[in-house]
Image (cartoon, rainbow, N blue to C red):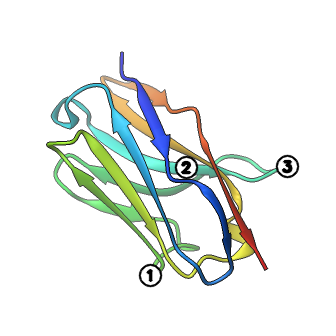
Amino acid sequence: QVQLVESGGGLVQAGGSLRLSCAASVSIFSINAMGWYRQAPGKQRELVATITIGGNTNYADSVKGRFTISSDIAKKTIYLQMNSLKPEDTAVYYCNAKRSLMDYWGQGTQVTVSS
């Protein structure tokens, strides 16, 4: 089992920044990949960014150049630095971990960007 706890969401004005954190209950070395997904009201959950144990990253086109995913192995934590936020970034952001063909999800954290 992998438990994930997110933090760092909130309300910010357009153009502002937020940093999300996701703490895992197990060593990141035991996880194949971690990432962030988001779900806006009335829309499907979509990938935002992922990072593998080797440090390879992948981003949705809509956030490239604005968001940065990173990991701190010692703290068993990944981060999502979000800059130049737009109202369309408003969503519940979920942390995801993939291990042994299983998907694990955090409870989600709300990000609201006002115009």
- Vertical placement of 53 versus 99: above or below? below
Question: Which label's residue is closer to the chain start, 2 or 1?
Answer: 2
Question: Which label's residue is closer to the chain start, 1 or 3?
Answer: 3
* Quadrant including the C terminus: bottom right
Q: Are marks 1 and 3 in contact (CB under 8 Å)?
A: no
User: Would you name the residue on which mark 2 appears?
Assistant: 37
Q: Residues within 10 Å of mark 2 (few under 14, many from 20)?
A: some
Q: Residues within 10 Å of mark 3 (few under 14, many from 20)?
A: few
Name the residue located 33 percent from the left edge and 49 percent from the top edge.
78
Q: Judge by depth and name the residue closer to the eye, 108 or 34.
A: 108
Left or right of residue 91: residue 95: left
Is disc 3 placed on a helix, strand or loop? Answer: loop
- Tell me the distance, in whole angstroms, between the alpha carbons under discs 1 and 3: 26 Å
Q: Judge by depth and name the residue closer to the eye, 13 or 105.
A: 13
* Rendering coords of residue 96 (x, y %): 45, 39
Say which quarter of the image contains residue 108: top right
Question: Which label's residue is closer to the chain start, 2 or 3?
Answer: 2
Is disc 2 placed on a helix, strand or loop? Answer: strand
- Vertical placement of 13 versus 109: above or below? below
- Tell me the distance, in whole angstroms, between the alpha carbons under discs 2 and 3: 15 Å
User: Would you name the residue on which mark 3 appears?
Assistant: 42
- Tell me the distance, in whole angstroms, between the alpha carbons under discs 2 and 1: 17 Å
Left or right of residue 112: residue 30: left
Name the residue located 58 percent from the left edge and 79 percent from the top edge.
16
Q: Are marks 2 and 3 in contact (CB under 8 Å)?
A: no
User: Would you name the residue on which mark 1 appears?
Assistant: 65
* Rendering coords of residue 106 (x, y %): 51, 33
Query: Tag 1: residue type?
Result: Gly
Is disc 1 placed on a helix, strand or loop? Answer: loop
Query: Tag 2: residue type?
Result: Tyr
